[in-house]
Image (cartoon, grey):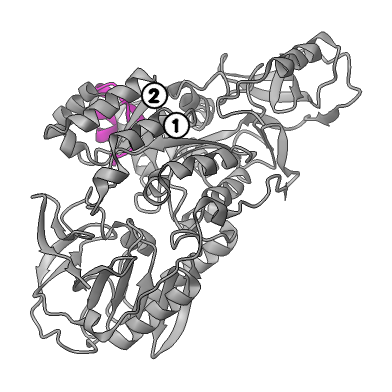
Amino acid sequence: MLDQRYRWKNKQIRDHVAVVSGKKSPTLLLKNARYLHSMFRKWMNGHIWIYGDRIVYTGDELPENTANCEVIDCSGLTLVPGYIEPHVHPFQLYNPQSFARYASQSGTTTIINDNLVLALQLGKKAFSLIRELRHSPVTMYWWSRFDSQTELREEETIFSHGEVKSWLEHDAVLQGGELTGWPKLLDGDDLILHWMQEAKRMRKKIEGHFPGASEKTLAKMMLFGADCDHEAMTGEEVYKRLMQGYMVSLRHSSIRPDLPVLLEDMKRLGIDQYDSMFFNTDGSTPAFYENGIIDRLIRMAIEHGVPVIDAYHMASFNVAKYYNIEHLHGLIATGRVASINFLEDEHNPTPISVLSKGKWLKKDGTAIIEDKDIEWEEYGFAPLQFDWELDYDDLQFSMPFGIEMINDVITKPYSVTFDIATDELTTDHDESFLILIGRDGSWRINTMVKGFSNSLMGFASSFSSTGDIILIGKNKNDMVCAFNRMKELGGGIVMTEKGKVIHEIPLNLSGFMSNKPMDILIKEEKRLKELLIERGYPHNDPIYSLLFFSATHLPYIRITQRGIFDVMNKTVLFPTIMR
């Protein structure tokens, strides 16, 4: 098996050359192909020779030796490079393998993954899992985070200099970031600046996270070393980033489905070059991917007037060139990894067949699984084990202060105006009990949440940004019931009512992820959302609401391991209580 950088061994390279010389047969010949040649920015006609996982020739010639060769006549088809998703959070109920398998069916054959959960849960042991994931027929690269995007009790050990440096030095890591902690950098944090400098020294990119940033802030971050940002929400924000020299990653996600707005705004502003842009879906929740991933974004771009070749380049060539991996990915040409999508025509970017690393993952519409299931427990992802109980004392509420949801992910403080010393709240308002309790049971913080639901009785989730336990509800008995069922599952999301479980999503991989296929997770998440909406959830993405209750890269008030935290003033308003 090749290593992450595809340093083919000498013998393999000699075999590749021998195929061109006619001494060996290709393993796969794609005849009469109409394909996108990104160097010329044109559709070409010719033949593509593949040996193992590598394209060894593209052009007009046919091989002399086809003794051991699968021959595919591509007449009537259009071939484009496998799509690249540069901004994947592969832990949004799904796991890296289940996401990769699902993504490949719509043509995404290279993904660049967030390492946050691996860094939080596994530390350096994560590298053995990354090594195992190299066996996937989908190519996986990674980021190196510089902060946790929340307030952890022991962040200085999780994101120590040694830990971050070991990630940056890993050959599977293409970039540092995303920079959710950039305000610390502006305030003088030289450790983050040092890590950025190290990334630059290693010729790796820095991904920004600059929502609402002013022109001067963007300029400052560029001077610090940021290369790209995915937080533009209007055409004007795209323009500002281009003006400061950024690569702009155009987002369309479950939280921010912005691509149609961005494309129309860009058209209005006269932005008609696309070489400095590519697409991302920003780690969306499962149901958002029901209708495709990067193929869906290509289709949107074409429908909004982006030239067809530019639309495909934004999904492949532009990404590869930006990350300095165009010698391997992003185009159909000699020497590249054999990852190719077979389309009925260029106006329909969802492939009927997918080749990745020279292996068929989809052929004539039929999915093919090439990799074996990961034994997750071997790599530290096992069902959660709780050696503590939730008792009545844990459900005492007296704080006259709570958090109010403005939208899916933004929370602000509010004053509680009624007596909360009761076992059940009425359903004529949208305030509920809220507890964050440490996974090890050593601490808790109790408050109220406004704007999550008006009739949700009991709810428990081990899915959170820190892996700690979130409890929400109107009825304390139902909250305990939900917690106890979550314990039995070994982690997950559980909804209860009148002492009964009405829905659950088991997350038996450390309480973060499921080992079920994406199509099942999509159904489970859609049902969860339906039930929450019936009970007054007014927003769009409850999974991200759970994830971001503790996320201190967003304003204004967050519930964290250290307590209720004022993001703008960087202070703990109410500390956690030791149990």
The amino acid pointed to by label 2 is: Lys
Quadrant that contains the C terminus: bottom left
Residue named by callout 2: 204
Quadrant position of residue 409: bottom left
Residue at 35% x, 60% y is 464
x, y percent for residue 494: 42, 75
Q: Residue furthest right?
A: 67
Quadrant that contains the N terminus: top right
Regarding mark 2 in the picture, which secondary structure is present there?
loop
Rendered view: 133 above or below 150: above
Residue 263 visible: no
x, y percent for residue 549: 26, 60
Q: Which mark is residue 173?
A: 1
> Is residue 231 rendered magenta in the image?
yes
Cα separation, mark 2 vs mark 1, equals 8 Å
The amino acid pointed to by label 1 is: Val
How crowded pointer 2 is (Cα within 10 Å; few <14, some 14-19, many 20+) is rated as: many
Q: Residue furthest front?
A: 387
Rendered view: 109 above or below 371: above
x, y percent for residue 262: 34, 39
Rendered view: 16 above or below 252: above
Relative to 41, is 227 on the left or the right?
Answer: left
> Is residue 451 rendered magenta in the image?
no
**Pointer 2 and pointer 1: residues touching (CB < 8 Å)?**
yes
x, y percent for residue 380: 49, 54
Q: In this orientation, which residue lies closer to the viewer: 14 or 449?
A: 14
Residue numbers of the magenta segment: 227-248
Quadrant position of residue 362: top right
